[in-house]
Image (cartoon, grey):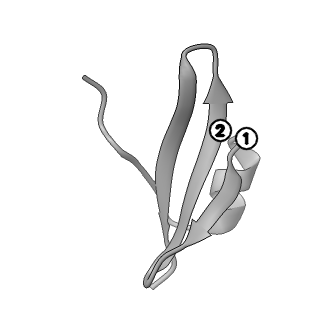
């Protein structure tokens, strides 16, 4: 099982190939398409 990826800035997540999926209380939920499905990550902006 893999861990949850957490970015410190939205720019870092976008550079890594993620796109914004939803807004959270502390930042964003981002996703990217992989060969096996969607990979999710968090962006904390506070």
Quarter of the rendering occupied by the C terminus: bottom left
Asked if 38 appears above or below 36 in the picture, the reply is below
Q: Residues within 10 Å of mark 1 (few under 14, many from 20)?
A: few
Sequence order check, earlier mark of 2 and 1: 1
Quadrant assignment, res 21: bottom right
**Badge count:** 2
Disc 2 secondary structure class: strand
Which picture quadrant has residue 33? top right
Can you identify the residue that label 1 sits on? Answer: 17
Q: Quadrant of the N terminus?
A: top left
Q: Give the numbered dot on residue 32.
A: 2
Taking the spot 65% from the left edge, 66% from the top edge, the residue there is 10
Work out whether 46 lies above or below 24.
below
Between label 2 and label 1, give the one nearer the viewer: 2
The location of residue 9, given as percent across then percent down, is 59, 68
- Compared with 29, 33 (above or below) is above
Foreground: 26 or 37? Answer: 37
What residue appears at the point 55 percent right and 15 percent down from the top-left corner? 36
């Amino acid at each position: 099982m893999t861990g949850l990826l957490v970015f410190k800035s939205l720019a870092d997540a976008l550079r890594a190939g993620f796109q914004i999926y939803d807004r959270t209380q502390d930042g964003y939920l981002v996703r990217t398409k992989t060969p096996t499905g969607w990979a999710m990550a968090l962006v904390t902006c506070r």
